[in-house]
């Protein structure tokens, strides 16, 4: 594997860079991209951050997120993907990345076990958040972790680690987070804005979803369902569903929690979370998706009952 030192050396002599986030962006991809953008800008590398999707409102308390573009505004010398396990995760920007990849320097900095090593320079280390990888890169670039950079790095660390509660959090996660706090990052604001705060309509949706959970395989699997109608009647968008899948994991007897978000009739975006025994990356992979062992996702097609059956079967096949 390429070391971060080599990537830092290459980036130090770059004139310009475009940083790509994954679609349906989460705190880790936004935090990774914005922190690296600020660090490269401080080193006089002209840099912009790109994401095909709208950036969820819950990140707007960090004003820099408004600079994120849907399409490139200049022809950058280096393309960098952050928290992107495969090019399909770029959504509408996949074609831009692949077209550029032929003649540009491409860099892939990620923490997903399912990463497909699609760039020229690949650094994939399975830490609790990709922001820990970016923090190390920023240190190698010789840029101090202060101000906005500290906030953006902590954003990814807090959100991807479930506020430092997931099983892959280790001492290194806390040391990296401590460096952000020393640099002035606002932990309480980041935790509140991203993990607790919701609109009234969002709270009502949450209550409805949680009161209609569907159990499969004798309660080993629990499924939450969000339909277009449930969102539309409250004027909500898809981003409010993020985190809903976590509720089911706290229920006694549940091994796998699932959230099904209706995209359109007979198409659902699926989120999986595992309590520890079942590898949901393997489950998601059977449907063409992926992610981490304890958190993964994919797209499923068909009638709802058919989808519940597919999920139950795939989980059963992956029971170790
Ligand atoms: P979430 O359920 O929060 O959307 O995603 C959980 C994890 O699985 C994230 O790390 C995300 O990157 C990954 N993931 C979600 N959907 C997909 C997918 O369709 N394909 C792949 N390869 N990974 C996914
Ligand atoms: Mn991540």
Image (cartoon, grey):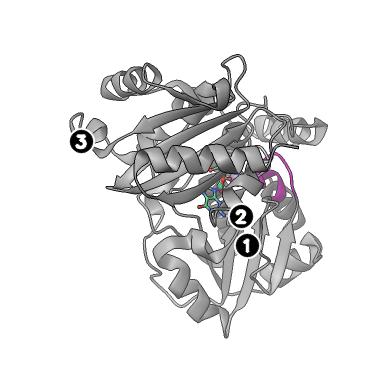
Q: Report how far apart the C-alphas of labels 3 and 1 lie in the structure.
A: 45 Å
What residue appears at the point 39 percent right and 53 percent down from the top-left corner? 67
Q: Of the residues tagged 2 and 3, which is closer to the observer?
A: 3
Give coordinates of residue 33: x percent, y percent: 55, 53
Label 3, secondary structure: give it. Answer: helix
The residue at 37%/31% (across/down) is 225
The nearer-to-camera label among 3 and 1 is: 3
Considering the image in quadrants, where does the C terminus appear? top right
Instruction: Tell me which corner region of the image, top left, top right, bottom left or bottom right, holds residue 56.
Output: top left
Residue 201 appears in which quarter of the rendering?
A: top left
Q: In x, y percent, where is residue 105? A: 63, 77
Q: Nearer the viewer, mark 1 or mark 2?
A: 2
Bin the neighbour count of mark 3 within 10 Å (Cα to Cα): few under 14, some 14-19, many 20 and up: few
Asked whether disc 1 touches disc 2, contact meaning CB atoms under 8 Å apart, the reply is yes
CB under 8 Å between discs 3 and 1: no
* Circle 1 Cα neighbour tier, 10 Å, few/some/many (<14 / 14–19 / ≥20): some
User: 6 or 238, which lies in front?
Assistant: 238
Q: Is residue 85 magenta?
A: no
Q: Which residue is mark 1?
A: 43
Magenta region, residue range: 126-133
Q: Earlier in the sequence, mark 2 or mark 3?
A: 2
Residue situated in front as seen by the camera: 142 or 56? 56
Task: For residue 242, say whether it is visible.
Answer: yes
Give the labeled residue for mark 2: 39
Instruction: Left or right? Give the position of 56 relative to 295.
Output: left
Report which quarter residue 95 is drawn in. bottom left
Seen as rendered, the residue at the extreme bottom is 103
């Amino acid at each position: 594997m390429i070391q971060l030192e080599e990537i830092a050396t290459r980036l130090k002599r770059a004139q310009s860079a475009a940083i790509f986030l994954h679609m349906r962006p989460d705190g880790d991809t936004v935090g990774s991209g914005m922190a690296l953008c600020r660090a490269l800008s401080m080193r006089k590398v002209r840099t912009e951050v790109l994401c095909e999707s709208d950036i969820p409102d819950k990140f707007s308390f960090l004003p820099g997120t408004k600079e994120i573009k849907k399409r490139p505004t200049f022809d950058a010398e280096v393309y960098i993907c952050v928290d992107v396990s495969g090019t399909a995760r770029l959504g509408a920007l996949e074609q831009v990345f692949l077209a550029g990849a032929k003649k540009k320097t491409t860099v892939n900095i990620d923490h997903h076990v399912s990463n497909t090593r699609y760039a020229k320079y690949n650094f994939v280390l399975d830490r609790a958040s990709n922001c820990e990888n970016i923090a190390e890169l920023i240190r190698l670039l010789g840029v101090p972790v202060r101000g906005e950079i500290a906030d953006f790095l902590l954003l990814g660390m807090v959100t991807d680690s479930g506020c430092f509660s997931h099983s892959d959090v280790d001492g290194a996660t806390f040391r990296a987070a401590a460096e952000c706090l020393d640099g002035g990052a606002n932990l309480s604001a980041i935790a509140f804005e991203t993990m607790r705060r919701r609109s009234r309509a969002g709270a009502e949706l949450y209550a409805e979803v949680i009161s209609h959970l569907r159990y499969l395989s004798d309660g080993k699997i629990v499924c939450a369902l969000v339909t277009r109608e449930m969102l539309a009647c409250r004027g909500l968008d898809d981003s409010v569903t993020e985190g809903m899948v976590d509720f089911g994991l706290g229920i006694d007897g549940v091994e796998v929690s699932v959230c099904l978000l209706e995209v359109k009739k007979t198409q659902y975006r699926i989120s999986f979370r595992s309590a520890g025994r079942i590898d949901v990356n393997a489950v998601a992979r059977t449907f063409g998706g992926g992610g981490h062992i304890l958190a993964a996702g994919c797209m499923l097609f068909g009638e709802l009952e058919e989808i519940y059956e597919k999920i139950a079967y795939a989980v059963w096949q992956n029971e170790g």
